[in-house]
Amino acid sequence: MRKRSITLKGHRTSISLEEEFWEALERFAEADGRSLPKLIYDIDRLRMKQNPPPGLASALRVYALRRVQDT
């Protein structure tokens, strides 16, 4: 597990994910031409539209899994 701190909507938050998920998210962000914080912000916005919204770490894992499945 690796914990990273990022700023979302003006607030600092810490996210703990396995290193493999961080690496995948970094690759996806680079492939999309955006920063990792921007990718996480976009995923966060989408998760907040769900009812009930999942935790951010779970949403990031699911996003990474779906990106891999779509390739």
Image (spheres, rainbow, N blue to C red):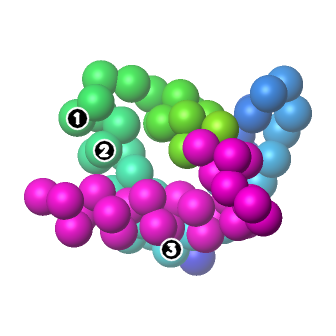
Tell whether 62 sits left or right of 69.
right
Q: Earlier in the sequence, mark 3 or mark 2?
A: 3
Mark in the foreground, 3 or 2: 2
Relative side of 46 to 71, left or right? right
Disc 3 and disc 2: Cα gap in Å?
16 Å
Measured in 3D between alpha carbons, the distance from the residue under mark 1 to the one under mark 3, in whole angstroms, is 20 Å
* Residue nearer the viewer, 66 or 13: 66
- Give the residues drawn in magenta, as a range: 46-71
Location of the C terminus by quadrant is: bottom left
At horizontal 47% and vertical 67% (from top left) the residue drawn is 62
Q: Amino acid at mark 3?
A: Glu
5 within the magenta span = no
Q: Main secondary structure of the magenta part?
A: helix
Mark carried by residue 28:
2
Q: Residue at x 33, y 63 (%)?
A: 66
- What number is the disc on residue 4? none
> Cβ–Cβ below 8 Å for labels 2 and 1?
yes
In the image, what residue type sits under mark 2? Phe
Provide the residue designation for mark 3.
18
Residue that label 1 marks: 31
